[in-house]
Amino acid sequence: MIKSPLASVKARFGEDRKAAKAELVKAVRAAGEGFFTDRLADSEGGLDRVSNAKLLRLESSFKTIKKSFASREKLVDGLAEVEKRKDPGFKAYLEKQSTLKLWDRYKSAKKRA
């Protein structure tokens, strides 16, 4: 049987609901360091208002991206290489996109290639 997101968070970070959520937010921030765009990093409510399921998915995605590419710039370069586009305007367009959008686009382009 699959655990609920709350049960997964409690199993990893402790039984206290608020403390576990705070620890999960810290883990996501640590995993996503260097991958957040300015738009998300400076938002008011921030990650405290995001659901546990999305935070767990963010953490696993950031860890995978960090393992495959050391930085966001390398992800943009890898995507441009896979799509065989070298023009600077395209890279500038990609740099405005969120990291997870870039990751999804990279996976899709890799399948097509």
Image: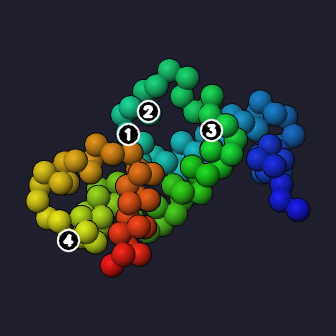
Q: Amino acid at mark 1?
A: Thr
The image quadrant that residue 29 belongs to is top right
Q: Tell me the CA gap for discs 4 and 3.
A: 36 Å
Taking the image as shown, residue 96 lies to the left or right of residue 45, namely left
For marks 4 and 3, the one nearer the N-term is 3
Helix, strand, or loop for circle 3? helix
Question: Could you say which disc has been placed on residue 41 in the image?
Answer: 2
Find disc 4 in the rendering and name its residue. Answer: 84
Question: Which numbered mark, 4 or 3, is in the foreground of this view?
Answer: 4
Against 41, residue 85 (above or below) is below
Query: Horizontal and vertical percent for residue 88?
Result: 12, 55
Find disc 1 in the rendering and name its residue. Answer: 37
Q: Tell me the CA gap for discs 2 and 4.
A: 31 Å
Circles 1 and 2 in contact, beta carbons < 8 Å: yes
Question: In the image, what residue occupies the spot 62% across and 38% down?
Answer: 25
Query: Horizontal and vertical percent for residue 113?
Result: 33, 79
Find disc 3 in the rendering and name its residue. Answer: 25
Q: Residue furthest front?
A: 112
Q: Amino acid at mark 2?
A: Ala
Against 64, residue 48 (above or below) is above
Question: How crowded is the residue under tag 4: few (<14 C-alpha within 10 Å), some, or many (20+)?
Answer: few
Q: Amino acid at mark 3?
A: Val
For marks 2 and 3, the one nearer the N-term is 3
Q: Residue furthest bottom?
A: 113
